[in-house]
Structures are given as C-alpha cells and as structure tokens.
Image (cartoon, rainbow, N blue to C red):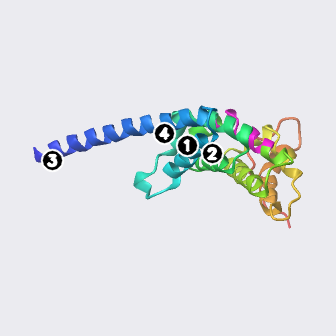
Amino acid sequence: MFRKLGEEKEVAELADRLSLSALSVSGILRCIEQSASEDLRTVAVDTLLTLMIGGCVFTRCPASFVVEAGAVTTLCELANDAEDAATLEILLELVRLAPESMLPDIVEQGAVQACIKVLESGGASPMDQLSALNLLLALSKRAPAPVAQSGAYEAVKDINNVALVPRRNKIMGLLRPLVQHDGDVPPLTNIRTGGLRF
C-alpha cells in the first residue's frame, strides 16, 4: 500500500515538473521571438542553452522536448538574423541529442540554411563560423542526404581559414559520396561500397 502511494506521489511530482518545464520553455521561446529588447533575447538564448547542457543529466531539459515545443523554427530564424554562436550551439545540441525521427524536421526548418548563411557572410567571426561548421558536421554525420541536397558541400568548400580547414575536410568527406557520384540518381547513403582501395 505504501509502495503504491509512493509511486503515485512520484508520478504526480513528475507531471508537475513537466508542466512547469513546458511553461518555462514556452516562456523562453516567447522571449527569443520578441524583437523589442535585444538583451532579453540574449538572456533567453543563454538560459535555454544552460537548461540543455548545464547541470547533471537528470536536471537537463531533453532535446526532444525542446524540439516538440517548436524551438527549432524560432532558433533557425534567429540564427539567420543574428548569426549568433549561442543559437547555433543550441541547434547543435538538438542535433546531437534529439531522436533520429526528429532530424528531418530540424533540417527542413532551416538549420542547414542558417549555417550556410553564417559561412557565406563576410562579417562572421571565426568562432561563429566554427559553430556553423560544428552544426553542419553533426548534421552530416546523422542525416547526410538532406544536408548534401541543401548545397552545404559547395558552401563549405569555399572556407580557407587554416584553423577551420580540418573541420571543413571532415564535412566534405562525409558529403562527397552523395554529391559526386556515378549515374543520374544520387545514393541515399554516404557509405562507400567496393571495399578498400590501395
């Protein structure tokens, strides 16, 4: 009897925490979406990043929860407008931690286009470019076909900063089999067949 009562109490506490999390994430997203105060937007982005990667594993906000709350579209729009490294870092954590079924949504809502815009802009700092390359690398590892179709290979090819070249080469190595292929139909995977060539 006491055991069942304890389980019911734990379930009720978990439901309360989830509803509180839903309210806090939606409030943070509203602060990110507003354009009246740039400081409030910056604090909201930093808070969301802290909720996702700060603290111990049990207190972090799950990436799937953030994706379901509709944060990807908001973050991609902000990354397109502000070219902010913190926003790209949140998207990177979403790509790393979200279930595979959510990756097409992340790509379709503009994560790759935000990275390409940062890489092609002349005023982006090397740290912003590094954040964009990190996000493209994570997307290229987990969902290479949509990334290759979006033109990321050509955008990455133009990077000539010596510090960023190793990251660029990794991305190009993952996307090259999908972009440069034999035949009319591109392959659906970047796994090379035919064994090793010496």
What residue is shown with label 3? 3
Mark 3 falls on what kind of element?
Answer: helix
Q: Earlier in the sequence, mark 1 or mark 3?
A: 3
Amino acid found under the numbered disc labelled 1: Ala
Amino acid found under the numbered disc labelled 4: Phe
**The image quarter in which residue 18 lies:** top left
Can the viewer see residue 98? no
**The image quarter in which residue 160 lies:** bottom right
- Mark pair 2, 1: CA separation: 14 Å
Magenta region = 106-117
Tag 2 and tag 4, C-beta contact below 8 Å: no
Name the quarter where the C terminus is drawn. Answer: bottom right
Which label lies toward us, 3 or 4? 4
Q: Is residue 112 magenta?
A: yes
Q: Residue at x 49, y 35 (%)?
A: 27
- Mark pair 3, 4: CA separation: 29 Å
Residue 65 badge: 4
What residue is shown with label 1? 44
Q: Position of residue 83 (x, y in %)?
A: 73, 44
Category of crowding for the residue at label 1, using alpha-carbon neighbours closer than 10 angstroms: few (below 14), some (14–19), many (at least 20): many
Q: Is residue 59 magenta?
A: no
